Image (cartoon, rainbow, N blue to C red):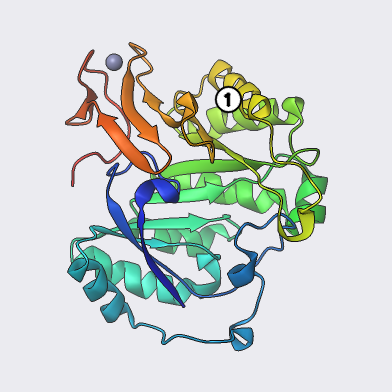
Amino acid sequence: MSVHIDPIEKKPVYHMLPGSRIFSIATVGCNLKCSFCQNWEISQCYPEEVKNPTKILTPEEVVAAAIANNCNSIAYTYSEPIVFYEYVLDTAKLAKEKGLKNVLVSAGYINPEPLKKLAPYFDVIKIDLKGFNKQFYRKIVGGDLEYVLAALKELKKQGVMTEIVNLVVPTLNDDMAEITKMCEWIYNNMGPDTPLFFSRFTPQYKLANLPTTPIETLEKAREIALKSGLRYVYIGNVPGHPGENTYCPKCGRVLIRRYGYAVLENNIRKGRCVFCMEKIPGIWDN
Ligand SMILES: [Zn+2]
């Protein structure tokens, strides 16, 4: 079992309690097999293969440890929380009872019914939408794109704040026509207020032969997303890039200035832009 305290920006989640620390837990395993997995040491193995297994904390112990460490939220993350679903559900229920917030970091490869059961206990769900091409999903990710889109629609239906991350892998899912289609789908099905990240791939695991994503590719993708009407589009894994900041869609000023996982400036008060009073979607006050 992995237990860490992370800045919430590391998830990445940008529209909930910026600058806060989130108690993060994971067991091993995943229901997908991405060749570009960035956490493959814990995701691509079975529990019995773990070399130095640590004690699994009970849900009560997780919640108590989060509170003792001054965290106001818990993330179910690193590997794929869908594979430890019952543990997630029990812990999230208890956390909610104790006044903590819950964040699920998932690839969304789950049926609508079990997702619907999780939804009421989660404040933000972050979904990795790995691309917008069925063949790519089948061959490189080891799953079916349709299920992920169905899960996203279910989250919209349940009214859970959803942030979407797309890891852009050179030559595999960096086709701008596909990215355009993906952005249009998000706009039409999830709405213009859905935060979207284009994250930089660094070569590893089975795709160590590919280059790092060029920054221009991420910038082009971000431009497409903004043009298709999405209001909060970010560039991930490029510390210091202006695409890390949250901008007000109405007046254009910087609302949250970031550098990597650090928050340098926050101009949101009571959920609104301090300059023009535009309402900004998210959870800004605890
Ligand atoms: Zn503004």
Would you say 30 lies left or right of 162 here? right
Query: In which quadrant of the rendered view does residue 200 lie?
Result: top right
Mark 1 residue type: Arg
Q: Residue at x 42, y 76 (%)?
A: 87
Would you say 236 lies left or right of 286 here? right
Label 1 Cα crowd, 10 Å radius (few <14 / some 14-19 / many 20+): many
Q: Nearer the viewer, residue 253 or 264?
A: 264
Q: Residue at x 34, y 29 (%)?
A: 257
**Residue 99 visible in rendering:** yes
Would you say 284 lies left or right of 23 here? left
Q: Mark 1 vs ligand 1: CB under 8 Å?
A: no
Query: In which quadrant of the rendered view does residue 265 lie?
Result: top left
Asked if residue 168 is positioned above or below residue 22 in the image, the reply reads above
* Quadrant observed for ligand 1 in the rendered image: top left
Q: Position of residue 184 (x, y in %)?
A: 62, 26
Q: Position of residue 197 (x, y in %)?
A: 53, 36
Q: Position of residue 100 (x, y in %)?
A: 23, 60
**Residue 30 visible in rendering:** no
Q: Residue at x 46, y 78 (%)?
A: 1
Asked if residue 225 is positioned above or below residue 145 in the image, the reply reads above
Would you say 60 lies left or right of 51 here? left
Q: Position of residue 275 (x, y in %)?
A: 22, 14
Q: Which residue lies under the disc numbered 1? A: 222
Asked if residue 115 is positioned above or below residue 47 in the image, the reply reads above
Name the element at disc 1: helix
Q: Nearer the viewer, residue 164 or 201?
A: 201
Q: How many marks?
A: 1
